[in-house]
Image: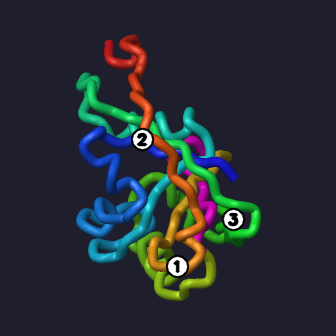
């Protein structure tokens, strides 16, 4: 399964470590819990990045990183029906609890979770502490630019 991440160039070397999520937390993890966030398409990775940018600020230092999960690595999937209503409107504590428990449980190295930015699409969470995570491949970063029309 292919996946993508977009990040600033200066963080590309640590894009597969979960350090950023551990330091700041996210929708699916609390501070102190390492998780790697990615998307199942470059377009979704772009939207996920865009919704977290400062308005009217077009970053000039972004890279996209494509990756691959081998077919031999088990990937779990969280169905949206089991989530609280309106889960996509805020970073609900129950979502962080779910992600933290998934990391601690160590059942799979990767988990598909629904995108809050585009319902019907999927993001991928990675557990960098899982033994199978070592088999996940992150490829060389490539310069990424948003279209200037997105910042008018």
Residue at 37% x, 72% y is 34
Q: Secondary structure at mark 1?
A: loop
Q: Are marks 3 and 1 in contact (CB under 8 Å)?
A: no
Foreground of the two, 68 or 79: 68
Query: Range of the magenta residues?
Result: 109-119
Q: Give the mark nearer the N terminus: 3 vs 1.
A: 3
In the image, is residue 135 above or below residue 7?
Answer: below
Foreground of the two, 101 or 110: 110
Residue 37, x across and y down, in percent: 46, 57
In the image, is residue 77 above or below residue 121?
Answer: below
Residue at 27% x, 30% y is 61
The total of numbered circles placed on residues is: 3
Q: Give the mark nearer the N terminus: 1 vs 2.
A: 2
Residue 15, x across and y down, in percent: 38, 54
Residue 14, x across and y down, in percent: 33, 56
Looking at the image, which residue sits at the far right?
Answer: 71
Q: Quadrant of the C terminus?
A: top left
The residue wearing badge 2 is 6
The residue wearing badge 1 is 130
Residue at 33% x, 51% y is 13
Q: Secondary structure at mark 3?
A: loop
Q: Are marks 3 and 2 in contact (CB under 8 Å)?
A: no
Residue at 55% x, 39% y is 44
Looking at the image, which residue sits at the far bottom?
Answer: 105
In the image, is residue 62 above or below residue 84?
Answer: above
The residue wearing badge 3 is 79
């Amino acid at each position: 399964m292919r996946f993508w991440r977009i990040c600033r160039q200066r963080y590309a070397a640590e894009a597969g470590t979960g350090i950023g999520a551990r330091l700041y937390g996210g929708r699916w993890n609390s501070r102190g819990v390492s998780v790697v966030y990615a998307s199942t398409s470059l377009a979704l990775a772009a939207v996920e990045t865009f919704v977290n940018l400062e308005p009217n600020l077009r970053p000039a230092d972004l890279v996209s990183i494509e990756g691959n999960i081998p077919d031999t690595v088990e990937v779990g999937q969280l169905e949206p029906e089991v989530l609280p209503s309106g889960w996509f409107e805020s970073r609900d504590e129950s979502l962080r609890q779910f992600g933290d428990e998934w990391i601690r449980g160590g059942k799979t190295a990767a988990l598909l979770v629904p995108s809050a930015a585009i319902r019907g699409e999927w993001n991928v969470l990675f557990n960098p502490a899982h033994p199978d995570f070592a088999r996940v491949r992150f490829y060389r970063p490539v310069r990424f630019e948003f279209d200037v029309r997105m910042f008018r």
